[in-house]
Image: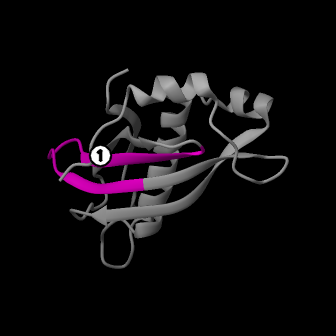
Amino acid sequence: MTKYIETFRSMVYPWHCDHQGHMNTMHYVGMFDTAFWHHLSALGFTRAYLEEQRTGFFDVKDTIEYKAEQPPGSLLRIESALAHIGNTSVVAFHRMWNTESGTLAATSEKVTVYASLDTRRKTPLPEARREAMLANLVERDK
């Protein structure tokens, strides 16, 4: 697996936009969240795996930087990569691009904790998956 992988594609529909004529912040959050779940699945944390293990990921911090307004009709692509793997946590970076203009629309940094769905408390990442993820780390873009 390469460092950044494509995890989401969509377009900006008029209902994504606010009264100022650009995509509203709540839709950036939703698109980045969807990308994150695709990213986790690509790393082996599929829905079936998580259900079988009775585990999940609980977000503890989301940071979004808005780089360029996206009007209705914009075609978007998100790519995702891992920035940090802890014992019980993962930090992922996401970059949203306008595919027609090549403009960076927004970035996201998500901190999430691997947790037991039974105890609702963090739990160590499975060692085999953690080791595989360590090979895919990237440094934060400056």
In which quadrant of the rendered view does residue 56 lie? top right
**Camera-nearest residue between 52 and 83:** 83
- SS for dot 1: strand
Task: Provide the residue designation for mark 1.
Answer: 75
Residue 92: x percent and y percent?
Answer: 42, 46
* Secondary structure mostly seen in the magenta stretch: strand
From the viewer's perspective, is 47 left or right of 137? right
Q: Give the vertical position of 113 relative to 44 (above or below).
A: below
Count of labels shown? 1
**Camera-nearest residue between 106 and 113:** 113
Q: Quadrant of the N terminus?
A: top left
From the viewer's perspective, is 109 left or right of 33? left
Residue 24: x percent and y percent?
Answer: 40, 69
Q: Count neighbours of disc 1 (C-alpha within 10 A) and say few if under 14, some if 14 to 19, many if 20 or more.
A: some
Tell me, what colour scheme is on the image?
A: one colour
Residue 135: x percent and y percent?
Answer: 38, 25
Point out the stretch of residues depicted in magenta.
Answer: 88-109
The residue sitting at the right extreme is 118
Which residue is at a point 75% across and 53% down the rendered structure image?
Answer: 121
Which residue is at a point 55% across and 52% down the rendered structure image?
Answer: 112
Which residue is at a point 31% across and 59% down the rendered structure image?
Answer: 72
Residue 94 part of the magenta-drawn span:
yes
The residue sitting at the bottom extreme is 19
Q: Give the vertical position of 120 relative to 138 (above or below).
A: below
**Camera-nearest residue between 48 and 84:** 84
Say which amino acid is labelled 1. Leu
From the viewer's perspective, is 47 left or right of 29? right
Which residue is at a point 31% across and 78% down the rendered structure image?
Answer: 20
Residue 101 part of the magenta-drawn span:
yes
In which quadrant of the rendered view does residue 53 lie? top right
